[in-house]
Structure formats: structure tokens, C-alpha cells
Amino acid sequence: MKLLIPVALSALIGGCSGVIAGDRHATVISVTDGDTFLVEMDGTKKRVRLCGVDAPELGQTGGEEAKAKLMQWIRPGTRVALDIVETDRYGRLIAEAWIPMEPPEIFLQEEMLKSGAAWVYPQYVGSCPNSRIMRRAEAIARENRRGVWENPSQIRPWEWRRLKMD
């Protein structure tokens, strides 16, 4: 059964590959942390926040690892396809992100979650077009105790940020 889940996910991704509504192409300039990066798009620099995921902050346990994991897929010069969901109060583009390749494309949210480098962000995942895929990817990491799931008592980034503000 465990082997069927990744196969089924790959089939789902393959099914949504190429039908990314409103996709925009951009070039990565730098990676900020495990869920944010800077791109050049339409001649301007834009900060992109991955829709529906929250990686450990750089000052938090696992933060540097999450950034390194994202950098396994994107580095300066990498072309990405973005499905922009909204712009947040900080001016960042909230987007689902893919590395466009021959099918299957690499869905960054899925890869970050499946590896255990991030959590599904419950407060915001509902606005992401591929939230079901993200939830399944997180379930795979949780079931296999990967990354953030190695230590179930690790503080979630949204809780960590709140504690830092108190």
C-alpha cells in the first residue's frame, strides 16, 4: 500500500501538469528560506511565498535544512512557473510553483511537504488550487517520519512566530 501512494500522487500530478491556470514564468534570483524566494518576472523583482505550506523559520530548528531542501530544486537562474493565488499584506506573491520540465513537472509544494521540510499551513492551504495534493504529500512524510515529522513535538512555524512576538 505504501508504494501505491507515491505512484498515485505521481499520476495526479501528471494529470494536472500542463493545466496550470494562469501560469506565469519567472526566473529565480535567490532563495530566502524554506517557503520564500525572489524572482524576476516581467522585468521586475517579486518575492514569492509558497501557497499553503509553512517551513521552519531560519532561527528555528530545521530552518536551515528547509532552505537547503528548497535549494535542491531551485537556485538562481532556475525558471519556475507560478500560479499566483493572491498578493499578501507584505506584497509577496502567494503562489503554487512548478519547475517546468518534460512531464512530470516538479510541484515545489509537494516536494517540500513529501520530504518533511515543511508543514501544510492549515490557515491558508484552502486557497491553494492543489491543496489535496499538498495534504497527501504531508501525510506521506508524517507516515514515514521524514524531516519535521521525526520529532512530533517540534513547534510549528506559525506557533513559533507567535511565541517570538509575545
Image (cartoon, rainbow, N blue to C red):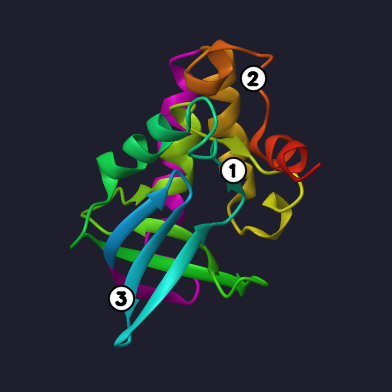
Q: Secondary structure at mark 3?
A: strand
Percent coordinates x, y for residue 101 in the rendering? 22, 55
Residue at the image position 68 percent from the left and 72 percent from the top = 89
Q: Are marks 3 and 1 in contact (CB under 8 Å)?
A: no
Q: Amino acid at mark 2?
A: Gln
The residue indicated by pointer 3 is 40
The residue indicated by pointer 1 is 54
85, 67: nearer the viewer: 67
22, 9: nearer the viewer: 22
Q: Select label 2 or label 1 by which is in front.
A: 2
Identify the magenta region: 1-27
Q: Residues within 10 Å of mark 3 (few under 14, many from 20)?
A: some
Q: Earlier in the sequence, mark 3 or mark 1?
A: 3
**Residue 20 in view:** no
Rendered image: mark on residue 154: 2
Percent coordinates x, y for residue 113 in the rendering? 51, 34
How far apart are labels 3 and 1 at the CA level?
23 Å
Residue at the image position 32 percent from the left and 87 percent from the top = 42
Q: Secondary structure at mark 1?
A: strand
- The answer to whether residue 48 is left or right of residue 138 is left
